[in-house]
Amino acid sequence: MKHILRILMIGLLLTACNKQTKKMDGYVINGTAKGLYNGMRVYLKAADERGSQMPQDTAIVMDEKFKFEGKVDYPQMWYLSINSVGGFIPVMVENENIEIVFNKDDIDASKISGTKANEALYNYTKGYKELMDKRVNLNKEFTKTLNPNNNVDSISKLRINTQFAEINQQLQDYPYQFLKTNDDNYFSLSLIENILKSNPADFEPIDNAYANLSTDVKNSVYGQMVGSKIEAIKKKNESLAMLNIGKVAPEFSAPDPDGKQVSLKDIKGKATIIDFWASWCGPCRKENPNVVKVYQKYHDKGLEIISVSLDKPGQKDKWLKAIQDDKLTWHHVSNLNYFNDPVAQLYNIQSIPATYILDADGTIVAKSLRGQQLEDKIAEMLN
C-alpha cells in the first residue's frame, strides 16, 4: 500500500510540474475594475506605424471584472482603455496569464502583473513617473525664479538650473540604465523597438542594449524581428558614412535618354557635379539656369555634370522636354522611378534639388550647394 501511495504521489507531482511548464496557446487577461459599472466596454488597442491605436480586442465589465482571451504570434505592446475613463495603460500582451488591477481614479496607478515583461513594464513606468514628478516640481521652482517679485538670489537660480540639467540627463539616460538591469524580458525588446522609432542620434547605446539581452529573448520571434531592424539601421549608417565629405563617391551607372548605360567613372572630370533633380521639381527648375551658367563657365576647365532625374514612371517625355527647355547640355541619366531610383537611394536622397561635388579623384568635397555657393566651390577647384 505504501508503495502504491508513493507512486501516486510521484504521479501527482509530475502532473503538477507539467501543468506549470506547459506553454499556453493564447493570452488570458483578467482585470479588476473597482467602481466601474456593468456593461462598460474595455478595449485592447495596438499602435500602427503612424502611432494611431487600432482596436484588437474588446471585453465587457461585469461585477467590476473583465476578461480577454485570444492569441498573439509574438509578444506585443498594446494599450488598454475603458469607455468614459480618460487615458490608457500599456500592456505587454503575450500568450500567458496576465492580471490587471485598473484604477479609474488614477489610471497611471493601475497595476499589471503575471508575466516578467509586464512586471518590468510596471517598474519602468513607475520609475519614469517618479523622475517626471521631480521634474515638474523643479519646473515650478524654476518658474518662480522668473518672477522679479520673488527676489530669488543668483545662487538659488544656479542651484535650480543645475538640478534641472541633472534631472533632464537622468530622464535621457533612464531607458538605457533600465535596460542594463532588465535583459531577460520582452518589455525590454519593446522599449528598444520604441527607441529605434525615435531615430536616436547615438545608435551605439541601443545596439549595445540589444546585444546584452539574454539569448532566449534575442532568439525569440520578436527578438529576431527587432534584431533585423537593428541590422537594417547598421547597414544604413554604414551607407551614410560612405557619403561623408572626404569619402570616395559610390560608383553607379544608369540609362541615359537613349537607354545606354552611363557610369560615373566614365564621365568624371577635374571637378564633377552629381545633380539630383526632376522635371516636376519647381526649385530644381529654378536652380537650373545657375547650373547652366556654371557649366558654361567651367566646362572647358574640366567641369563635368551628370544629372540624375527622379522623374516618375511613364513620364520620359516630360524629362526630355525639361532637358531641352532648360538647355541642360551635359550627361543625363534616369531610371524614371521617382525617389525609388537606385542611384537616389544609393546617395540617400530625401529631397531635391541635391548635389554632390567631387574632385578629380572622385572624392566628395562638398554637398547640397546651390546658387553662388556652387559657383564659388567650382571656381575654387578649377581656377
Image: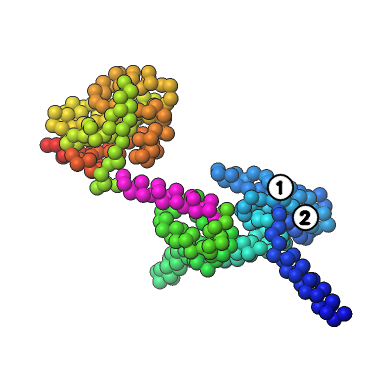
Residue holding disc 2: 66
Where does the N terminus fall, quadrant-wise?
A: bottom right
The percent coordinates of residue 24 (x first, y second) are: 71, 58
Query: Is 113 or 81 nearer to us in this picture?
Result: 113
Q: Which residues are magenta?
A: 223-243
Check the image and report above or below for 247 versus 218.
above
**On the picture, is 119 further left or further right than 288?**
right
Check the image and report above or below for 156 versus 49.
below
Which image quadrant is residue 273 in?
top left
Residue at point 30%, 24% (across, down): 260
Residue holding disc 1: 57
Q: Amino acid at mark 1?
A: Asp
Q: Provide the secondary structure element on which disc 2 rests.
A: strand
Which numbered disc covers residue 107? none
Most extreme residue toward the left is: 383
Disc 1 from disc 2: Cα separation: 12 Å
Residue at point 59%, 44% (across, down): 48
Q: Is residue 240 magenta?
A: yes
Q: Main SS of the magenta segment?
A: helix
Q: Amino acid at mark 2?
A: Phe
Q: Is residue 133 magenta?
A: no
Query: Is 11 or 251 nearer to us in this picture?
Result: 11
Residue at point 40%, 48% (across, down): 235
Check the image and report above or below for 36 versus 307.
below
- How are the residues colored? rainbow
Tell me which numbered mark, 1 or 2, is placed earlier along the sequence: 1
The percent coordinates of residue 174 (x first, y second) are: 50, 64
Where does the C terminus fall, quadrant-wise?
A: top left
The percent coordinates of residue 6 (x first, y second) are: 81, 78
Query: Is 226 or 133 nearer to us in this picture?
Result: 226
Which image quadrant is residue 159 in?
bottom left
Q: Provide the secondary structure element on which disc 1 rests.
A: strand
